[in-house]
Each structure stands twice: as structure tokens, then as C-alpha cells.
Image (cartoon, grey):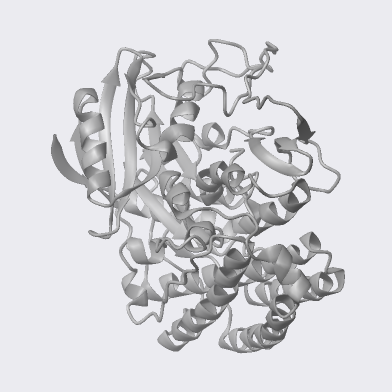
Amino acid sequence: MSAATLGGARLVATTAGELVAQVKSLLDGGARFASLVADDRDGDPARLLLSYAFVSRSAKELVCLRASVEGGRSPSIAPFLPAASWAEREVSELFGWTFEGAPDQRPLVLHDDWPAGQFPLRKSFALTSPPPRDERPFDYCRVEGEGVMEIPVGPIHAGIIEPGHFRFSSIGETVLLLEARLFFVHRGLELRAQGLSPDQGAILAERTSGFGSLAHALAFARAVEAACGISVPAEARRLRALALELERIWNHVSDVAFLCAGTSLAALGAEGSILKERLYRANEALFGSRWLRGVVCVGGVRRAPSPEAVKSALAEVERVLGEFASFEKKLFGSATNMERLAGTGVLKRWTAVALGVVGVAARGSGIATDSRADLPVDDALEKDPFRLVRQREGDVAARARVRIQEVLVAWARIAALVAAGLPAAPLRSPVSLEATGEGFGWAEGARGELLTYARLERGKIARLKVRSPSRMNWAAVPFAMPGNIVPDFPLINKSFDLSYAGCDL
């Protein structure tokens, strides 16, 4: 084993034989699993470069444990690290790799009708026409016993939402087990990114998940900047941070408003939707985009609002937050509404830790994790009044309270960023058109930590890996459901507020 550096991370080289021991050593030191990147660099189907990313809170750094593995197989770490299970299953399908001892080897991303022997992220894969489908039954978990019934929901839903399939095993309305399946519209974004320039990649990143456009663009930009050694001007970093907090505010306001639909508070839900719309308009007044697209670019920012626009738009945001305080009192002041929120959809702390849950879902279960604190703080924000918010109950009400309190933290950060100074015009460091390198980038989006890996060869993306917060958190939703009733599922699901698109990459 040896240690070196890699853009945005400390690189630790290991071997297949030492991998398990090294992972356990990191876990014993308090690190948490963040991502697994597989890279088919030489096109040999019997060889892969595996990079396991861990966040070390004690050292406040990202650690990349890297092993060049051969023979078409390597040891699984999922038996003692459940958080890595989905990551290993994804690599198995997309690269044709075997993780020995993996507890769950069912299809995850490509589903059971994908033809055998087709591995879309291998260099040898060429998609010239849609592959023939090979229908096979899916081996889901069955609950048997007197009175047990199965209730399948989706993947096509009554509302205008993305597809996901949920199979409830219940007695009456009480849920015994929930099994969730996603990835019905897997888009192949990581394959699509290959050969793109960094500027083209930033546009693609923004479209990974609409509710996190800014966070995805920022994590991508930071990954490329780390790979190429690009230093971003402090004023541009502050404007990026401001836009990220605006994205957090409108997401949190929207998420709390959506809870009202799950408890039949239609009038209050409509009031929250109006507040969200006003925040959208403030975004547009500042940056020309309701969803904050086109703000971040590799090396800096493409757009910069005038001081007058900042003053006017943020005054409107402040007015909205004043009304949101009244909204909060109505939400939590109703005894009948609190009966639905409190004690519903509890995600236990130990479950969240085992699954590597991030963001609001983790902090609502008492876990003090936030990449703004866990990873090195941007020196442009050294006077940042950041405060980590936690609740310990792990229920729907706790996740709502975390969001409400984080809105106030975000507003305090915005005020500090404005006071520190923002660029008066687009500001960008030069980007080499022939750059070669690799690196990690992160952002703490509204849903939680987002981690992106990028490798460039002569100015073009050779490998892109996106790990969204929803990718880590979807596996936890079924654990919050047993013991609740079926009609509580929409409320519990909304309280996590996860993105289907954030998984269907």
C-alpha cells in the first residue's frame, strides 16, 4: 500500500488482497463510504481500476482507495458495508465484473430484460441499435403467511412523476415489507459524457436532475478543476455558494409544502407553492434561470447579477422567508396534522449509518454529516456562519424541521457572502483545451452530498461518475416503512424527497 494525491482527494493504492482490510481500517477510523468508480482504461474485460471514495470526517478529506484488479473478480465489501451494495451491483452490470461474496447479486440498473454479455461501460461495447430484450423473472423478496397480501404500485403512477415500482407486503393496511425498484429510464449519461469538452459536460451535469441543477454543475466543475489544477477566483466561489444556498432554500420550501399534500392540508400546500413560485422568480431575476442553470462553468461563473439585482431579488427572498415562518407555525400548530407527521416513517440512526445515508435524511436521524463541514471548507467562505442542523427522532416531522431550520442557515450564509463581495461580471479562470488529469468534486445540495469523479484526456472527458444523494438514500426508504400503513407511503416518500433521475443516470 502507498499514499499519494489525486485531484480533490488523498489517493491510497492497494491490492485486491489488501482491499477488505484497508476498507475496514478506514471505517474503524470513522470514515464513511461515498462512492465506487470503475474505470475500463485498457479495454481488457478481465481487468478494472476500482476507486473507492470515503469521506474522513476526522481528517476532513476525501480518501480514494484504489486497486487495479484482475481476473474478472474481486472481493465484495458489501457484507460488512451495506452502503456499498448498490455501487457493486451497478459495476457488475455495467462492466461485467464479479464481486465475490456479495450478498445481493440481482440486477439493479439494467433490469432483468437486458441481454446477457452486454456491458455498456466497457470500451468494447458499441450501441448501434437497441439491444434485444431477454425477459427473465425478477427475484423479489416474498413475505408468506396467513393474511399477507402484496400491493404493487408503479412504475407508472397517476401523477406526473418519474417511474418507480414499489411492492408492499402487508397485513391489512400495516406494512411488513417494502421493496423498491428504480432505474426504469436509465439514460446512459456517463457513457454520453465520454468525448465531451468540460463546457459540454457542465451542460450535461445540469440536466442530471432538475431540482439539483446548480449542485450537479458545481460538483462537476469542482471535479474538473481538481483534475486540471484550476484555481477559481474567490469572488466567483462566493457567487457559486450563494446560488447553491438559493437552490437549497427553494427546494426546502417546496419540500415542506409538498408534505401538506400527504396530510390533506390542500390550502396550506397551495400557500407553500406560491412561496416556491416567488423564489423561482427571484432566481430568474438574479441569474436568468428559474432552476439556476447556466450559472456555474468550469473555472468560475458564466453569469453575475448586478448589485441592484442582488439587492432587489434578495429583498424578495427575505419577504418570502418571513411568510414561510408563518407557514411553519400553521404546519406544526395543527394537532391533527402532527399526528400524521410525528412517529411516522422513522429511519433509525443505525440503519442510516449502515446505508451511508446523507443530507436531510441523515441529519433528521441524528447523524452529524454535511459535506460543507466534513470536507475542507472553501477559503472564500472562511467567515461563513455555517451551522449544522440535526434532529434525533428520524421521522417525517424531524426531516421537515431540519429543512425549515436549514432555510434560516442558508439565508445567514447568503447575507455573509454578499457582505464579503460578489463579482460584478462573469469571472472565469482559463481552462486548458489539452488538459489531462482526474479528480473528485463535491457539493452539499438540497438533498445532501453529491460526489462527482471526472477523468480528462487531452481536454475531453474520458470517464465521468456521478453519485447523487438520492443514489445513497433510496435504499433507506423501505426501512422507514414497516409498521406504518400503506396510505402513509406518499407522506414518508415526500419527506425523503428523493430524485428518480438522480439514480437513472
Whether 378 is drawn above or below 192: the answer is below
56 and 102: which one is in front? 102
In screen coordinates, is 127 left or right of 445? right
Whether 233 is drawn above or below 59: the answer is below
Farthest residue toward the front?
146
Give residue 199's position: percent from left, percent from top: 51, 50
Q: Quadrant of the C terminus?
A: top right
Farthest residue toward the left?
2
Q: Residue at x 69, y 77 (%)?
A: 332
Q: Residue at x 55, y 76 (%)?
A: 405
Give residue 486's position: percent from left, percent from top: 76, 46
Give residue 136's position: percent from left, percent from top: 67, 12
Q: Which image quadrant is residue 67 in?
A: top left
345 and 210: which one is in front? 345
Q: Quadrant of the N terminus?
A: top left
In screen coordinates, is 400 left or right of 32? right
Q: Which image quadrant is residue 252 in?
A: bottom right
Whether 418 is drawn above or below 57: the answer is below
42 and 67: which one is in front? 67
Give residue 238's position: percent from left, percent from top: 44, 74
Q: How many marks?
A: 0
In screen coordinates, is 124 left or right of 266? left
Q: Residue at x 64, y 89 (%)?
A: 315
Whether 415 is drawn above or below 125: the answer is below
- Is residue 277 visible to us here? no
456 and 482: which one is in front? 482
Q: Residue at x 46, y 39 (%)?
A: 465
- Is residue 460 visible to us here? yes
